[in-house]
Amino acid sequence: MTLRSVCLFCGSASGASPAYLNAARAFGRELARQGVTLVYGGGNIGLMGAAADAALEAGGQVIGVIPEFLKAREVAHLGLTQLHVTQSMHERKALMAELSDAFVALPGGFGTLDELFEIVTWAQLSVHAKPIGLLDVEGFFQPLLQMVRHMAEQGFIRPAHLELFCQADDVPTLLTRIEDYRPVTASKWLGLDRT
């Protein structure tokens, strides 16, 4: 597939390791280098701000989507190519999904996981067939992937749905895997004769 835009989910904090900030900047720069628009939550802080700044500094296009209540707290990035302001978090996630050809998660907290698992659930339910990537900086996502495998082993997720995640520990490899992604076609419902 040809990527035109990638949605980034990541922390509004910088995290404990300098590697997280370095990865966010590398992600933004690489998208700009490839001419791919960065779509993200519109903030000017943490990993999200670092990725946006790096993409802009490298000449890239960056679209932010932020709810009004967060913009009012003065965390909106005002130097973006475009900034969309929504009324709610739900509208924010829906618009980010609509504007993006793929999704990538970098390290983050509850908000990152919320966004990631909503978009994975939509893929599982065939609401979309877009690639979902994990930039596994210093093994950040390994405990999460272990939990996902455990859910599959315990009969709550089809093993085929483990393939919903593309993963790599460096940006160019991850973007290549996203471009090569083939949608998973397994039904979500376990134990039912549905296709």
Image: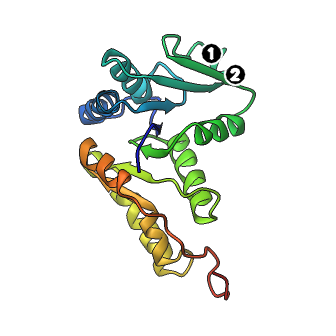
Q: Secondary structure at mark 1?
A: loop
User: Label 1 vs label 2: CA separation?
Assistant: 7 Å
Q: Please give the residue where the numbered disc 1 appears in the rendered image.
A: 73
Q: Which mark is residue 30?
A: none
Give the residue drawn at x 67%, y 87%: 192
195 relative position to 35: left or right: right
Q: Secondary structure at mark 2?
A: helix
Place residue 30 in its image quadrant.
Answer: top left
Q: Please give the residue where the numbered disc 2 appears in the rendered image.
A: 69
Report if the CB atoms under discs 1 and 2 are less than 8 Å apart. yes
Q: Position of residue 44 (x, y in %)?
A: 47, 18
Rendered position, 54 above or below 22: above
Give the residue drawn at x 57%, y 60%: 123
Q: Of residues 162 and 186, which is closer to you in this image?
A: 186
Q: Position of residue 172 (x, y in %)?
A: 25, 43
Place residue 96 in its image quadrant.
Answer: top right
134 relative position to 191: left or right: left
Q: Position of residue 188 (x, y in %)?
A: 61, 73
Quadrant where the image shows the C terminus: bottom right
> Within 10 angstroms of label 1, few (less than 14), some, or many (20 or more) residues?
few
Circle 2: residue type: Phe
Its colouring scheme is: rainbow
Rendered position, 120 above or below 46: below
Q: How many discs mark residues in the rendered view?
A: 2
Circle 1: residue type: Arg
Q: Of residues 93 and 4, which is closer to you in this image?
A: 4
